[in-house]
Amino acid sequence: MGKFFKILDLGVASINKNMAVFGITLGVLLAFVNVFLRYTFNTSLTWAGELTNYLFIWGALFGAAYGFKKGIHISVTILLAKLPPTIGKAFLIFAHTLSFIYLGAMSYFGYQLVLIIAEFEEMSVDLNIPMWIPNLVLPLAFGAAAFRAGEKVYEVSITDADDVMQKSEEELIHDMSQIQGAEK
């Protein structure tokens, strides 16, 4: 079972990272080309603005989901540092559980929104594609982020309370990857 979750972990991380890089990179290049065309040749790609927006949205949301894996989201730990380690660990588990529930709900409601948009057969103005396609980012990215938040609940729950409170989140992730590597 551990191998399955390791493969799933690598797959989710790869999709998140690649979609973030692809979305941001292609969005920047498309915006640059459109501005260059506008100021050099006095013409532009009519569909480029809409596609650039969608690419940035996809890149940002998948990048945020990837941020859960790397532990780069901002967190305020001043209160946790003042608590006994066991209570601090319980608060962290509670916070990550709330994040998991919220992100899971956002993924579910994003899926419901995609179904509604598909039912209405709404089309984008400039790209002339079904609007459910760009909105598919909601269930996918929030689902990936929920997976990562659930992973955090697990990581914190199996780590000793003293270690949770003394180590940074990135150190815990590094320790978990070493543990998973040793289980092979």
Image (cartoon, rainbow, N blue to C red):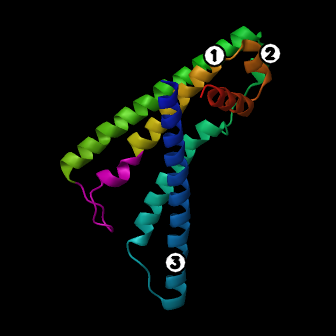
Towards the viewer: 37 or 169? 169
Residue at 30 percent of width and 51 percent of height: 132
Residue at 41 percent of width and 78 percent of height: 45
> Where residue 101 is drawn, which disc sits there?
none
Task: Please name the residue that numbered disc 3 is placed on.
Answer: 33
The mark nearer the N terminus, 2 or 3, is 3
Q: Which residues are magenta?
A: 122-137
Placement of 98 over or under 64, stated as above or below: above
Residue at 57 percent of width and 21 percent of height: 154
Placement of 183 over or under 44, stated as above or below: above
The mark nearer the N terminus, 1 or 2, is 2
Q: CA distance from mark 3 to mark 1?
A: 50 Å
Tag 2: amino acid: Lys
Check disc 3 and report its element: helix, strand or loop. Answer: helix
Check disc 2 and report its element: helix, strand or loop. Answer: helix
In reply to whether residue 32 is colored magenta, the answer given is: no
The crowd level at tag 2 (other Cα within 10 Å; few <14, some 14-19, many 20+) is few
Q: CA distance from mark 2 to mark 3?
A: 52 Å
Task: Please name the residue that numbered disc 1 is placed on.
Answer: 158
Check disc 1 and report its element: helix, strand or loop. Answer: helix
Tag 3: amino acid: Val
The crowd level at tag 3 (other Cα within 10 Å; few <14, some 14-19, many 20+) is some
Task: Please name the residue that numbered disc 2 is placed on.
Answer: 82
Tag 1: amino acid: Ile
